[in-house]
Amino acid sequence: MTLREKEAEIEEEFSLYDDWTDKYEYIIELGRALPAFDGASRNEEHLIKGCQSQVWLNASYNGTLLHFDADSDAQIPKGIVALLLRVLNDERPEVVVEADLSFIDRIGLKEHLSPTRANGLVSMIKQMKFYALSYLPKDGKEH
């Protein structure tokens, strides 16, 4: 599934809900469905700076695809990072770097977040793209 197809799927799911109370419930459900996070990665190194809550993000690279694992100590941020993982997980690093993630605006997420949560969302995206940049092939050679 392409990045755009994943975004369209999320947009369609969000369109099923009439109000933001229901959309937040859906976001919380997405967070609850995240796979278990490695307890050893719950450390300062994996903590995303700029989030009001604690959000941990880890990335691994198999030579082709970038895989993310994440967790949070709060329900809404955990759901938000789950949304990002749905779109960016198991993609090539260059796809992650170039992703515009405009689905976030199309579903109205940013405008319905508090300023601190919106900053946290931006920090999550920056960290995911930072990981992707670090795995981009150097001089045309795989990492």
Image: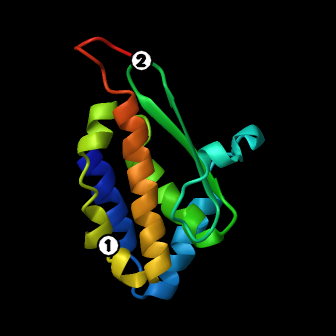
Front one among 130 and 9: 130
The percent coordinates of residue 94 (x first, y second) are 27, 33
Position of residue 75 relative to residue 6, above or below, is below
Position of residue 120 relative to residue 7, above or below, is below
Residue tagged 1: 107
Residue at left offset 64%, top offset 70%: 75
* Element assignment for label 2: loop
Considering only order in the chain, which callout, 1 or 2, is on the residue closer to the N terminus? Answer: 2
Residue at left offset 67%, top offset 48%: 44
Front one among 134 and 20: 134
Count residues near mark 2 (Cα–Cα under 10 Å), then give few for <14, some for 14-19, many for 20+.
few
The percent coordinates of residue 142 (x first, y second) are 34, 14
Quarter of the image where one finds residue 106: bottom left
Left-right relation of 140 to 19: left
Left-right relation of 36 to 118: right
Give the alpha-carbon distance from disc 2 to disc 1, as whole Å: 33 Å
The percent coordinates of residue 54 (x first, y second) are 64, 62
